[in-house]
Image (tube, grey):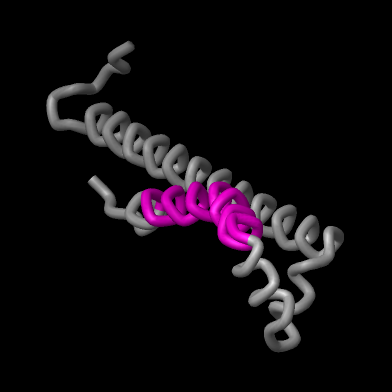
Amino acid sequence: MTSTTSGKFASPLLGAGLLLVASPIVISWFIHGDTERYLWIINGPVPFSSLGSGPIQLYLYAGLVAFGCILIVTALVARRRSLVRQRSAELSSSRTAPGLWFDQR
């Protein structure tokens, strides 16, 4: 059986993707959860002061969701590829076993 690294990184990629997809909800709750906290954030330094505007929040949330979806798809493709490689390795080893000169299907 061959060992590939694509199967080992699939679970962390999937977890990171799910966290990134869920993070806009947490960020929105953090920003808009309390009026005092909202004012503290938008009166802060330059990157945080932009979080008060709608378009910046929309770009931030869309970027996080898009990058999370990319990670999820990458993890699913890596997991699928590792399963296909594992099954093909098992099939090729069973067909070339000593004493089996015919195709077993």
Type of secondary structure dominating the magenta stretch: helix
Which residue occupies the foreground of this view, 54 or 72?
Answer: 54
Looking at the image, residue 2 sits to the left or right of residue 47; the answer is: left
Read off the magenta span: 10-34
Q: From the viewer's perspective, is 97 left or right of 92?
A: left
Asked where in the image residue 43 lies, by quadrant, the reply is bottom right
Residue shown at the point (18%, 31%) measured from the top left: 97
The residue shown at (39%, 44%) is 82
Residue 42's place in the image compared with 32, above or below, is below
Residue at the far left: name it: 99
The picture places residue 87, in percent across and down from the top left corner, at: 34, 32
Q: Is residue 51 above or below residue 62?
A: below
Does the magenta portion include 23?
yes
Q: Is residue 71 visible?
A: no
Residue beneath the point at 24% across and 35% down: 93
Give how far across and how far down residue 58 sits, in percent: 79, 56
Residue placed at 75% from the left, 78% from the top?
Answer: 49
User: In the shown orientation, is residue 85 left or right of residue 52?
Assistant: left
